[in-house]
Image (cartoon, rainbow, N blue to C red):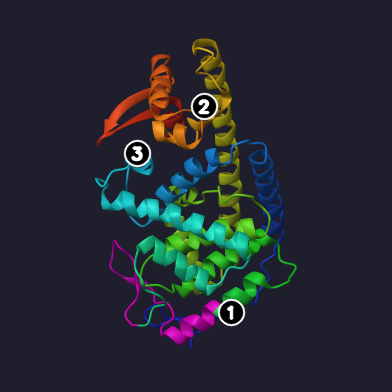
Amino acid sequence: MGFDPRRPYNELPPLPPQVDVETKAVLKKAISAGRTLAELKGLGETIPNQSMLINTLILQEAKDSSEIENIVTTDDALFKAFSANTSRVDPATKEVLRYRQALWEGFNALKKRPLLTTGLFIRIVQMIKQNHSGIRDLPGTVIGNPRTGEVVFTPPEGESVIRDKLGDLEAFIHAKDTLDPLIKLALIHYQFEAIHPFFDGNGRTGRIINSLYLVMKGLLDLPVLYLSKYIIDRKAEYYRLLRQATEKEAWEPWILYMLDAIETMADFTRRRILDIRSLLDGALELARQKLPPRVYSKELIEILFRQPYTKGQFLVEAGIAERKTASAYLKELENIGILRGQKVGRENLYLNVKLYDLLSR
């Protein structure tokens, strides 16, 4: 039987597709995207304090990936909630923070065991959703057009069927083949979205898998490439190309879309890292000129770039100062214009204004 969007797609074929996906246009784009990704990886290796990237870029990927699913928070609410000890965090911001936690959990799991498995996918989605749900085991899941209500896709149905599809996907991910890994990433992302193994959280889990796959293949050292911004800017095209790959086996446009996403966002992220490093250098020079010698240290200024909001506890944990001294240091930094203090609950937080402005662009 042919594809029917209203019928569970239990005939979803395993990867790779039975057509040539390494067309001339795809191979050319894969080379270009791979080169740009390598430049990003090389730049990341020059950053002395990797937490500068982890707590800024990964948080923004979490925010944008969640926004695709209409879970919306603001940069300020997100960065503030990440740094403050407060229970007054709205549900959307909490869910975004859980995405960041799930990505980090997946990254650490990959370092211990470099495999992308169904078990890991389940752990990721459970962390995002904060529940114990697993593979879909009930019928009725459909993908619809939110504007018209039309059913555009019905994913495979039945837990055993879904597990078999995921098993095939695992085999493809880890197969020793000659496919370019970036082309494989595009195919893996399509297949995971088509299997749609969970009741909720599939899109976010799939985008985490993208980042982990790049790390697993050695194309990045940290999962700092956030493709979600690209997808948000081209959301209609993303869903249209997914649908065409299913209905018409139109693989080339889908793969080219994903390769362009990798290339565009690798370049964007590389430039953002350079901008962060430039801000850090400027803050180091300003602090060296303006701060008393007893206050100034390179380690102190670097802490201000781990995330936009800083507090005395961060300085204490880094061994830079005791609690009272840490508060005095932050006040000095506020006096010379690097930080701006504000009260959040019972805590005093200090905003790195220029870093926040950069990340909010």
As measured in the structure, the alpha-carbon distance from the residue carrying label 3 to the one carrying label 2 is 20 Å
Q: Is residue 103 in view? A: yes
Image x and y of residue 25, in percent: 68, 57
- Residue 72 forms part of the magenta stretch: no
Residue at numbered disc 1: 168
Residue at numbered disc 2: 300
- Quick one: which residue is furthest to the bottom in this view? 1
Three-letter amino acid code at the position of disc 3 = Lys
| Other-residue count near label 3 (Cα within 10 Å), few / some / many at <14 / 14–19 / ≥20 | many
Image x and y of residue 133, in percent: 36, 73
Near-viewer residue (6 or 81):
81
24 on left or right of 10:
right
Near-viewer residue (156 or 42):
42
As measured in the structure, the alpha-carbon distance from the residue carrying label 2 to the one carrying label 1 is 49 Å
- Residue 158 forms part of the magenta stretch: yes
216 on left or right of 193:
right
Tag 3 and tag 2, C-beta contact below 8 Å: no
Residue at numbered disc 3: 80
- Quick one: which residue is furthest to the right in this view? 178
Instruction: Find numbered disc 1 in the image and state the secondary structure of the residue it sits on.
Output: helix
240 on left or right of 108:
left
Three-letter amino acid code at the position of disc 2 = Leu
Q: Measuring 60% from the left and 38% from the top, which residue is drawn there?
A: 270
Q: Report the span colored magenta.
A: 138-166
Who comes first in sequence, dot 2 or dot 1? 1
